[in-house]
Image (cartoon, coloured by chain):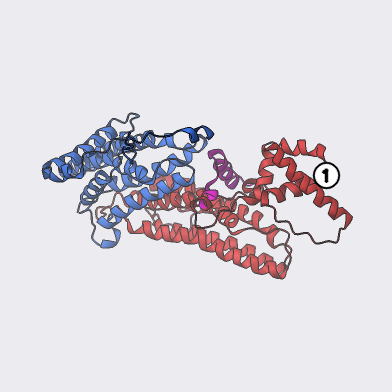
Amino acid sequence: FAGLADVSIAEDIPVEGEITIPVGSHSPDEDCSTLDEPVRDTIMRDLKAVGKKFVHVMYPKKSSALLRDWDLWGPLVLCVSLALMLQGGSADSKEDGGPQFAEVFVIIWFGAVVITLNSKLLGGTISFFQSLCVLGYCVLPLTVAMLVCRLVLLAGSGTVSFIIRLIVVVAMFGWSTLASTAFLADSQPPNRKALVVYPIFLFYFVISWMILTFTPQ
Amino acid sequence: IASLVMYLFAEFDDAANLLAANPDATTISIDEPAEISKNQHSRRQEPGREEDDELLGTDDSDKTELLAGQKKSAPFWTFEYYQTFFDVDTYQVLDRIKGSVFPVPGKNFVRLYIRSNPDLYGPFWICATLVFTIAVSGNLSNFFIHLGKPTYHYVPEFRKVSIAATTIYAYAWLVPLALWGFLMWRNSKVMNIVSYSFLEIVCVYGYSLFIYIPTAILWIIPQKVVRWVLVMFSLCLSGSVLVMTFWPAVRDDNRRIALATVGTIVLLHALLAVGCLAYFFDAPELDFPAPVIPAHNVSTVVTKSR
């Protein structure tokens, strides 16, 4: 740096400029614009994001949209609707009935948290909320299965309806597991993939069991 | 890095020379645990420069031996501390499960498979699987038993899942805690050659519960004899794993205490199996009550009661 000692700046050239360094990513418009937009735009933007992720789940390709822009609105909506549809399956005594709303909620969220912790402890590189997002969104096929089951049960509850329900639930269970594995498997160390996939399998199996054994009053 | 290792071995050489000169001197080493193990390893051989190459060119088994002692050095409030308990690969978990289902007579499960790398993955997920397997199998079994009856209305019996979870997780974590405390207490009185850490005991108990998963699935078969044969069989297998693990830890003790400890372990294990069978699986009823069923008529009774 010895050469800089000889540099001198002429008196008549003003030294001026910006002192802040612009950040790499373009910052979005000033806060005022999203604050001033109509409420409909705000809601539609979030709904479109959620809907796009639904489409990604139903046709699981190796896209990173689900992982990059995670949100938990979709899982919340799915979990609440699944828990609501599993209501009404009580028996004579409260003891032996199906799961209550709170139980379904706890199983889904606590199960997703445990699976996420498990994959992170095994050395996975995915972040906590990204994993929750994927696991929650992949409940979508099972919610569809629950809807179909309830409609079939409206028609009747004999052996034929049971076989239809069984086929639908098994197919959707396979779809859920494959979709979530497709999104999550890449972030795991290669010799531990099976260790991470098995709890996901167990999680969706338990939810499928709850759906299949739903019997209306 | 090679120069750093050379420097460290030079330090060790000085220390070894000093120790040889004055064996009774107390030495305080402030090395990191990695260097201490390296020093101990090389102390068994002749200290000298020619051995450095051998030590530097470590193969995998050497490295695991050296690093085995200092895995859990992270403080317990960090995430890395708990990651050390999940440091297993798929084939290792499968090997441990295989070792719990096919116990080799005379071989210790802990020494053979766990080898100072206890994991929490196996115990936790085997218990979770067992909870849901027992609940689902019990539900299915009751459904098939009561199928033809006109007054029967199927219920999912979801409450039993939480009861199963409490029982099995309490067994898999509190009994090892009690056993570990007991072994520590006896260790302070009688010097035992073999002693286990708490996690190793949890590991053995967790993996020994694996045999109950296929047993619970087979309990769907609504025949009393089949169920009790399955109970005996799985109890023998997993009980033998536990006995072969814990007998070396107590055999140096007072004879009666050793036998009582091993007996209690087996008894608790049997209680778990029998309790689950009795609570989650309704008793199968035969079409016609027969007070005594001779053994050779079992097959004909089975076909008649279908």
Task: Tell me which chain the residue with mark 1 is part of.
Answer: B
Q: Nearer the viewer, residue B49 or A136?
A: B49
Q: Position of residue B88 (x, y in %)?
A: 55, 43
Figure colour of chain B: red
Q: Residue at x 33, y 51 (%)?
A: A109
Location of mark 1 (residue): B47
**Dominant secondary structure of the magenta stretch?**
helix
Q: Residue at x 33, y 59 (%)?
A: B159
Relative to residue B302, is residue A179 drawn left or right? left
Q: Position of residue B28 (x, y in %)?
A: 75, 59
Q: Residue at x 29, y 62 (%)?
A: A95
| Chain letter tied to blue | A
Q: Does the image show residue B215? A: yes
Q: Which residues are magenta?
A: B82-103
Q: Is residue B93 magenta?
A: yes
Relative to residue A22, is residue B40 drawn left or right? right
Q: Can you name the residue that lies furthest to the front here? A: A11
Relative to residue B191, is residue A22 drawn left or right? left
